[in-house]
Image (cartoon, grey):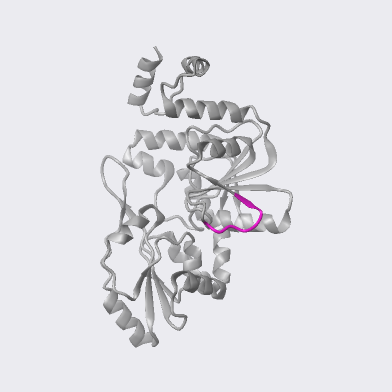
């Protein structure tokens, strides 16, 4: 009766169901009834039979090579040369330093194998529900914002919106977390609430903010990447996203009502020089930037993977209630 049981579970918000006996029977017969489930089952069974490599660290992050994970990985490379550092990415074309091995998220076999055999997971989002942490593995949650959290997330968001599937995901992820790295007492309080976590927290600062102390280097990188005139001054406009009210959590781009012409005129009148405006939408709605009409002096940088490098490269930043607002203070 596994099909009836699975149907009832799905009605209660549990979507990842695996019926082992029929799947093994299908495997012996060379049949595939549920292609995705059979494939994941085979990969999981194969990977879990392999020993855990304590020197393998897998990074699984919202933006490929960016955020806290990037700075943590850079320091690991500096102090250790015996680690197998794996980064799960959406785009294999990204430039990575020597010593980091890339695995495409869409490559299910490699993704599952490296996750299941790693001694440590370092994640700033959440672990997929088809993945199960094994005895002997350590999961460190580093979240993807700096030391102050301004938006609801995790359990707080899921419970407010009464989304059963999101609540289930948060519950699954929370039970696996061993440690959380935070940047302030305020950050610790919100992370304990958002992740529903009562375990050990390391209040160790904001690793991603290290990038802000290398402004000239990142200015050069950004200018070369977008072919910008180095004599121009840069304003970064980085609004966060909104989400639809009611039933389902659907991120949306904030309504862009900034008058670019007036902003440019005011900048040149007050500070002098010639200005470019860098438009950076939040990564979860970055594709929305392509739909916007933009003057030629507005450069769309929504596809750039590292927001901290953009902050470091810019002379001024405008944002809304995004926690990125605190980072220019370091520059």
**Left or right, 276 with reference to 58:** left
Magenta stretch: residue 222 in it? Answer: no
**Residue 229, quarter of picture:** bottom left
Task: Read off the magenta span.
Answer: 94-101
> Magenta segment, principal secondary structure?
loop
Task: Locate residue 208, reporting x and y percent.
Answer: 55, 60
Answer yes or no: is residue 153 visible. yes
Q: Is residue 45 above or below residue 180?
A: above
Q: Which of the image's four quarters has the N terminus?
A: top left
- Residue at 35%, 54% (x, y): give it: 285
Q: Is residue 292 above or below residue 139?
A: below
Magenta stretch: residue 98 in it? Answer: yes
Task: Locate residue 146, reporting x and y percent.
Answer: 50, 58
**Residue 11, quarter of picture:** top left
- Label count reads 0
Q: Is residue 123 above or below residue 74?
A: above
Residue that protrudes farthest toward the front in the picture? 30
**Residue 206, quarter of picture:** bottom right
- Residue at 38%, 22% (x, y): give it: 9
Task: Locate residue 86, reporting x and y percent.
Answer: 61, 47
Answer yes or no: is residue 183 visible. no
**Left or right, 149 with reference to 255:** right
Task: Locate residue 221, reporting x and y percent.
Answer: 52, 70
């Amino acid at each position: 009766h596994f099909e009836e049981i699975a149907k009832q579970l799905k009605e209660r918000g549990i979507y990842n169901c695996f019926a082992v006996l029929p799947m093994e029977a299908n495997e012996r017969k060379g049949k595939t009834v549920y292609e995705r489930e059979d494939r994941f089952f085979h990969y999981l069974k194969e990977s879990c039979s392999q020993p855990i490599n304590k020197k393998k660290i897998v990074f699984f992050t919202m933006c490929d090579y960016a955020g806290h994970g990037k700075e943590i990985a850079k320091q690991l490379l500096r102090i250790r040369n015996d680690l197998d550092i794996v980064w799960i990415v959406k785009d294999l074309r990204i430039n990575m330093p020597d010593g980091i091995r890339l695995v495409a998220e869409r490559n299910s076999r490699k993704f599952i194998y490296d996750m299941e055999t790693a001694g440590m997971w370092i994640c700033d989002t959440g672990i997929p529900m088809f993945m199960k942490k094994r005895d002997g593995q350590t999961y460190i949650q580093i979240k993807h914002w700096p030391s102050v959290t301004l938006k609801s997330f995790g359990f707080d968001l899921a419970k407010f919106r009464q989304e059963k599937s999101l609540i289930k995901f948060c519950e699954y992820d929370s039970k696996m977390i061993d440690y959380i790295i935070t940047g302030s007492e305020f950050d610790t309080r919100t992370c304990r609430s958002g992740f529903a976590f009562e375990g050990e927290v390391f209040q160790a600062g904001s690793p991603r903010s290290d990038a802000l102390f290398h402004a000239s280097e990142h200015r050069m990188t950004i200018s070369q990447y977008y072919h910008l005139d180095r004599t121009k001054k840069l304003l970064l406009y980085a609004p966060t996203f909104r989400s639809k009210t009611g039933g389902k959590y659907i991120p949306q781009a904030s309504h862009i009502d900034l008058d670019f012409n007036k902003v440019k005129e005011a900048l040149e009148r007050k500070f002098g020089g010639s200005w470019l405006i860098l438009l950076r939408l939040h990564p979860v709605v970055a594709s929305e930037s392509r739909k916007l009409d933009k003057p030629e002096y507005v450069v769309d940088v929504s596809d750039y993977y590292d927001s901290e490098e953009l902050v470091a490269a810019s002379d001024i930043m405008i944002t809304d209630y995004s926690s990125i607002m605190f980072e220019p203070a370091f520059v």
